[in-house]
Amino acid sequence: MDILLYSGGLDSYIAWWYLGRPKTLYCRLGHKYEEWELDAIRRTIPETVIDDTLVNLGRKWEEEDANIPARNLFLVLVAGLYGASRVWLVVQEGEMEIPDRSEKFFRMATEVCSFLLGREVVVDTPFRHMTKVDMVKWYLEQGLDVGKLLETRSCYSSRGKPCGECGACFRRAMALKLNGLEEEMEVPIEESKIVREYYRKWKEGKYTGKRGQEMRKFFEILRWEV
């Protein structure tokens, strides 16, 4: 049985369609934006199984930038306990250098889960060769519901409207805007400090390849010097 770890976010919602609508699982972590993720889940894939095994993980270990160390290892183990033979964890091209999103992690998580559970549990991602921009493009090319896509939640803040000031909002805004979509945020994305930080790093050459090219197009749309 395939299980997709679903967060109510843009990436995992697209993955649900891309993978043929497998069973979805959300693990409550007690993190600051959890209730908004649950709200997005109710509006997009309400049949998602909600697990509370890890409900205090975020409250104790969540860092200022919303990172929870080793989160993905905990998540794939829970999915394995639900009987998954394949666990889909959504990571896209350009973000696989992070330890618990890396190819090494997928290999090691597969080995650990299989060893602990006494059966093969493959931990995988469907989007190794697709960026978030590519993923949104694929979704639109299938003629799927744009309204539902925009009901997903990607923001790290606990406020009602997407803040426009976190890294998740920047990446989401870029993926949407480069596909001709717009979304209202608390702080307009072109006025956000986080976008200026990404712009600075891009100008310094810290983003290259396809992701760097996408950023260039995004900053061109904003009419910033490129």
Image (cartoon, grey):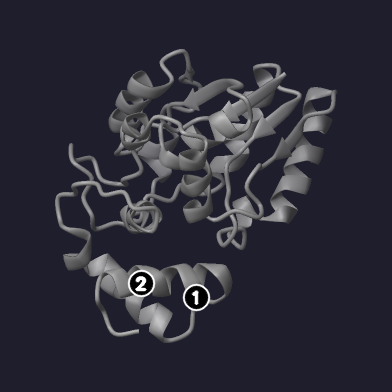
Q: Left or right? Give the position of 103 relative to 213.
A: right
SS at badge 2: helix
Which residue type does callout 2 highlight?
Tyr
133 and 208: which one is in front? 133
Q: Which residue in the structure is indicated by mark 1?
A: 207
Q: Residue 123 in the image: state x and y as whole percent.
A: 72, 37
Residue 21 lies in what quarter of the image?
top right
Query: Are the residues flagged by discs 2 and 1 in contact, CB closer than 8 Å?
Result: yes
- Packing grade of label 1 (10 A; few <14, some 14-19, many >=20) is some
Rendered position, 199 above or below 214: below
For the point 49% across and 52% down, which residue is it? 132
For the point 36% across and 35% down, which residue is it? 146
Which residue type does callout 1 highlight?
Tyr
SS at badge 1: loop
- Packing grade of label 2 (10 A; few <14, some 14-19, many >=20) is some
106 and 111: which one is in front? 106
101 and 9: which one is in front? 9
Please tell me which of labels 2 and 1 falls first in the chain. Answer: 2
Rendered position, 206 above or below 7: below
Q: Residue 67 in the image: state x and y as whole percent.
A: 43, 51
Q: Residue 72 in the image: state x and y as whole percent.
A: 58, 41
Residue 198, which numbered label? 2
Residue 2, which numbered label? none
Q: Residue 97 in the image: state x and y as whole percent.
A: 61, 63
